[in-house]
Amino acid sequence: MKPSSQLLAQILEDVRPLMGRGKVADYIPALADVPNHKLGIAVCYNDGDLITAGDADEAFSIQSISKALSLTLAMQNYRAEEIWTRVGKEPSGQAFNSLIQLEMEQGIPRNPFINAGALVVSDMLHTRQSAPRQRMLEFVRQLADNPHLCYDKVVADSEMQHSDRNAAIAYLMRAFGNFDNEVVPVLTNYFHYCALEMSCVDLAKAFFYLANQGTPLSGKTRILTPTQSKQMNALLATCGLYDGAGEFAYRVGMPGKSGVGGGIIAIVPGEMSIAVWSPELDPSGNSLAGTAALELLSARIGRSIF
Ligand code: GLN
């Protein structure tokens, strides 16, 4: 069922009382300063309609949602076995920035959506692309049909100044032989991807290809094959929300990817892509009211992959 803008607005009102129960990411000042009451939702439907409510047009830091975009670029540039010998496909059950499993599992990250996995993917992009940051920017501008999309330099620089844990993850993987380039340039790229500024509208449009068997909204060049699109959705459903993936599958029942900026994208394959934004996070680092909004949407339109 196609949601109406009234339904989306009602859902936002229904989750608004949750404000104050979560915590805005505060590991860098640029994220800590985002007002906690922001709330937006956008749906891109398969007939081309865009349905929105709340702060759907306001850009925010997409953070780890970018990990799905960088994996898509890697899938375009590498054969499957080249990727999946360097990173796994299993949920980690650990925090997104944990180092524990990495030591025990010889520098092979559990999946591409925890930080370790996304850093390996960024390393791979660095090897095969001459200007990875520019390439990512062109890719998202095209996908979202928005030539104005940019990196937030303040966020990217601030991440770099607070990069000890991500640097430790990258150096540990390098020690195990699972990192080909110098750590600092790859970290710089990774933080730029995280610092992409996009609105719910941009995100819903950009991720429509995952609801459309790999073909973007523009209908032009295929981004992924239908099989790759299915594989990406499977990874998002099992690993996209870190150690909250099971809870998210139980409550929302859609492939999804979250970021500590408070955004979440979710996919109903064959039908629609959805983006929500609410900056307060639950203990796993996923948007608290955003998850609740998706849960209500899933129930009210009767859609889930399960
Ligand atoms: N930039 C953040 C980090 O690397 C992204 C984490 C996230 O959104 N979960 O820690």
Image (spheres, grey):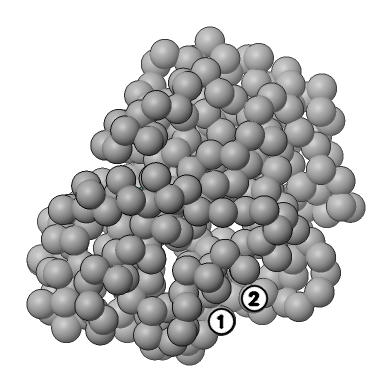
The three-letter code of the residue at mark 1 reads Gln
226 or 50: nearer the viewer: 50
Residue beneath the point at 57% across and 64% down = 137
Q: Which residue is mark 1?
A: 76
Q: Is the shortest distance between ligand 1 and the CB of mark 1 under 8 Å? A: no
- Image side of residue 98 versus residue 299, left or right: left
77 or 295: nearer the viewer: 77
- In the rendered structure, are the residues bearing label 2 and label 1 in contact, judged by CB atoms less than 8 Å apart? yes
- Dot 1 crowding, Cα within 10 Å, few <14, some 14–19, many 20+: some
Residue 70 position (above or below residue 83): above
Query: Where does residue 143 sit, x and y in percent of width and height?
Result: 69, 62
Residue beneath the point at 52% across and 32% down = 291
Q: Which residue is mark 2?
A: 224
Question: Picture quarter containing residue 270?
Answer: bottom right
Query: Where does residue 211 sit, x and y in percent of width and height?
Result: 70, 58
The three-letter code of the residue at mark 2 reads Leu
Q: Is any atom of residue 172 visible in this view?
A: yes
- Image side of residue 218 versus residue 275, left or right: right
Residue beneath the point at 64% across and 40% down = 200
Residue beneath the point at 14% across and 61% down = 168
Residue 20 position (above or below residue 101): above
Tell me the distance, in whole angstroms, between the alpha carbons under discs 2 and 1: 7 Å
Identify the element where label 1 is drawn. Answer: helix
Query: Where does residue 180 sit, x and y in percent of width and height?
Result: 25, 84
Q: Is any atom of residue 248 visible in this view?
A: no
